[in-house]
Amino acid sequence: MSQQLAHISLVVRDYDEAIQYYTQVLGFKLIEDTKLSDVKRWVIVEPNGSMGGCQLLLAKAATPEQEKHIGNQTGGRVFLFLFTDDFERDYQNYIAKGVLFTIAPHTEEYGTVAVFKDLYGNLWDLIQPNKK
């Protein structure tokens, strides 16, 4: 049996602003943007240099209940974990682009990490894992 996590749905306010943020600020690649209806699109982004791992499905909130969860999909916990091969490069790049870090870079047993908020307020860990 072989299984793989393919996409994580991220509820967003607007497709175009989310695409702009994830591609221009975080440097992700736009993989797909397909119109499904007058109001729904299939929008996939992934980190630059990703090797076929999990991708983000940017899903525009369709109901008031979904809108309430934009930016707080996990009740205030860190939601997504972005691994990097060069922490300092990405940290400095994100700072220069206005990304808000809520926890400064520090070293943990597993590597170097800092916590940032995306444009909606979701918390992310930026992590450079220790070499094994």
Image (tube, grey):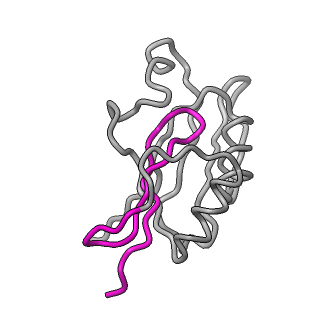
- Return the residue nearer the eye: 47 or 121: 121
Task: State the quadrant of the C terminus.
Answer: bottom left
| Stretch of the chain drawn in magenta | 106-132
Instruction: Based on the picture, tell me whether residue 40 belongs to the magenta stretch.
Output: no
Residue 104 image position (x, y, % from top left) = 44, 54
- Number of numbered tags placed on the structure image: 0
User: Would residue 94 be seen by someone viewing this image from the given angle?
Assistant: yes
Q: Relative to residue 9, is residue 32 drawn left or right?
A: right
Residue drawn at the location 61% of the way across and 73% of the way down? 49
Looking at the picture, does residue 39 appear above or below residue 3?
above
Please name the residue shown 29% across and 67% down the image. 108
Judge whether 67 appears above or below 71 on screen.
above
Q: Quadrant of the N terminus?
A: bottom left
x then y, percent, for residue 6: 45, 57
Is residue 17 or residue 105 the one in the foreground?
105
- Left or right? Give the position of 109 relative to 63: left
Image position of 19 (left or right of 117):
right
The structure residue drawn at horizontal position 29% and vertical position 72%, both measured from the top left corner, is 110
Residue 125 forms part of the magenta stretch = yes
Residue 83 picture location, percent across and down: 46, 67
Where residue 96 sits, quadrant-wise, is bottom right
Magenta-colored segment: predominant secondary structure: strand
Q: Position of residue 60 (x, y in %)?
A: 59, 29
Residue occupying image coordinates x 55% and y 41%: 118
Specify the farthest residue to the bottom.
132
Q: Is residue 28 visible?
A: no
